[in-house]
Image (cartoon, rainbow, N blue to C red):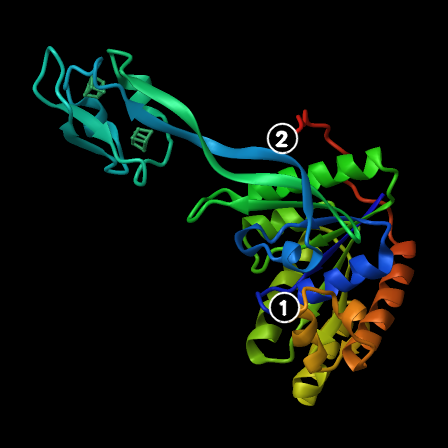
Amino acid sequence: MKELVVISGKGGTGKTSVIASFAALSRQAVLVDCDVDAADLHLVLEPRTVRREDFSAGSQARIKPGHCTACGKCEELCRFDAIYFDGPGNGQVPKTFRVDPIACEGCGVCVDYCAEDAIAFEPVVCGQWFISETRCGPLVHARLGIAAENSGKLVTQLRRTAQQVAVEQRRELILCDGSPGIGCPVIASLTGASLALFIVEPTASGQHDFVRVAELASQLGVPGILAVNKADLNEEVTRSLERLAAQRGMSVVGRIPYDRAVTHAQIARQSVVEASDGPAARAIRNVWSAVVAQLELVPTAAIRPVFVEITPSE
Ligand code: SF4
Ligand code: SF4
């Protein structure tokens, strides 16, 4: 099994358009949208959900008013100022303490030190993940709650589930829409992948972020290749990107020109190669051919499938 991660360093560079086209060209891959903070692959692929699971990334404290004696120990110990003395009274005290769920970081200190065992510590559901069917193959994706954290943990869950689906359906390739930036979700997207395809726009910020994420991939031991999107918008920066790639020993697998057909495809909820045979579609087809050739050269993904219990949705 091999995993291709399409990555950009910054958002909005067209990586989802590219990976949706790859999905349409491959039809044999498992697709996974690891851009969990701004998932959008489902908008193009119109999935039909077959399994749905809650995602819990941690626990939160909750004071049980009936048990609290208002000793104040928890408020004294909470380093996040998440405990307030404005909870409802009970038979013993007129007021109890209360945890602000937004401020609580789930460290668990108050739970450990409450002598009355008055603080519950409960898992917080902060999103859902899905296995869906699409016209281009199975898609593993997620919806993270507003302001929910721990998206790196969710990315790991998605990749493991995609590996499981690949094994079950005897599919040899996983196409992963990676997260932008260089933070935890990107590290979770890249670690153990077979190959990273960098989709970069020829702008100063695109180049800056490409250098950072290429360095990250290198440190993680993931080989990379580069394709420049909207390459004709700035020939000078495009050449600079290609020089930077060459200095890092990366192959440049294509230039995708600016093409209004990409926007029209997005509006039509289709991939570029399904909606058009124009310059961008032709370039993406060429990039796909080069990617397939590069995948032949790299070893299989280092991460082995971790089987998780999946129960059908209601
Ligand atoms: S430590 Fe326990 S008993 Fe004391 S105020 Fe906090 S919740 Fe109430
Ligand atoms: S779990 Fe930690 S952050 Fe949350 S209320 Fe208790 S001490 Fe504060």
The quadrant where residue 231 appears:
bottom right
Q: Position of residue 201 (x, y in %)?
A: 65, 76
Q: Nearer the viewer, residue 294 or 314?
A: 314
Say which mark, if any, is on residue 174: none
Amino acid bearing label 1: Val
Q: Position of residue 186 (x, y in %)?
A: 61, 52
Q: Is residue 300 left or right of residue 175?
A: right
Q: Is residue 146 left or right of residue 104?
A: right
Q: Looking at this rendering, what residue extends furthest in the left direction?
A: 94
Residue bearing mark 2: 313
231 vs 79: above or below? below
216 vs 211: above or below? above
Q: Is residue 141 left or right of residue 297?
A: left
The quadrant where residue 62 appears:
top left
Residue bearing mark 1: 211
Mark 2 vs mark 1: give the one in front.
2
Identify the residue at image location x=22%, y=28%. 98
Q: Residues within 10 Å of mark 2 (few under 14, many from 20)?
A: few
Amino acid bearing label 2: Ser
Q: Position of residue 277 (x, y in %)?
A: 83, 77
Identify the residue at image location x=75%, y=72%. 227
Q: Earlier in the sequence, mark 2 or mark 1?
A: 1
| Secondary structure category for the residue under label 1 | helix
The quadrant of the picture occupied by the N terminus is top right
105 vs 41: above or below? above
The total of numbered circles placed on residues is: 2
| Secondary structure category for the residue under label 2 | loop
